[in-house]
Amino acid sequence: MAGMVDTVKEFFVNLYNNVNGFSDDVYNKALGLIEPFISSVPGILKLIGLVFTALFVVLGAISFAKKLFKLFIVLILIAAILGAIIYFTQMR
């Protein structure tokens, strides 16, 4: 039994190391691409880009929250309808 546990443990440790190495590689390549392009841009354009990115994230989060709220309302309505159907069929 201990051999099986060690094999499973080794599998997950190797999986973690492979994913970690891949993510480090992607992160380093992304930094390598960003460095020459972003460092040459003037500060005011960086600030404008940051503001628009923040605006995009905030508006996206608001849109997501609105859609989630609508989904919640629909689920409540479905549950109420099903509850009413079950309640009225149990009365007979």
Image (cartoon, helix red, strand yellow):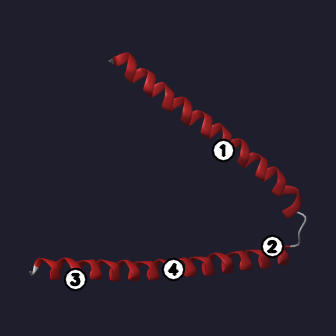
Q: Position of residue 34 (x, y in %)?
A: 82, 57
**Secondary structure category for the residue under label 2:** helix
Residue type at mark 3 is Ala
Instruction: Determine whether, in the image, residue 4 is placed left or right of residue 61.
Output: left
CA–CA distance between discs 1 and 2? 26 Å
Q: Which residue is mark 3?
A: 84
Residue type at mark 2 is Lys
Residue type at mark 1 is Ser
CA–CA distance between discs 4 and 1? 32 Å
Residue 23: assigned label: 1
Between residues 52 and 70, which one lies in front from this camera angle? 70
Instruction: Determine whether, in the image, residue 28 is placed left or right of residue 5.
Output: right
Task: Give the number of the mark in front: 1 or 2.
Answer: 1
Q: Tell me which label, 4 or 2, sits earlier in the chain.
A: 2
Q: Please tell me whether residue 78 is drawn above or below residue 14 in the rendered image.
A: below
Q: Which residue is mark 2?
A: 46
Q: Tell me which label, 3 or 4, sits earlier in the chain.
A: 4
Residue type at mark 4 is Lys
Q: Residue at x 34, y 79 (%)?
A: 78
Q: Which residue is mark 4?
A: 67
In the image, farthest residue toward the right: 40
Question: Are there few (<14), some (14-19), or many (20+) residues within 10 Å of tag 3?
Answer: few
Q: Tell me which label, 1 or 3, sits earlier in the chain.
A: 1
Q: Residue at x 61, y 40 (%)?
A: 20
Instruction: Determine whether, in the image, residue 12 is placed left or right of residue 73.
Output: right
CA–CA distance between discs 4 and 2? 31 Å
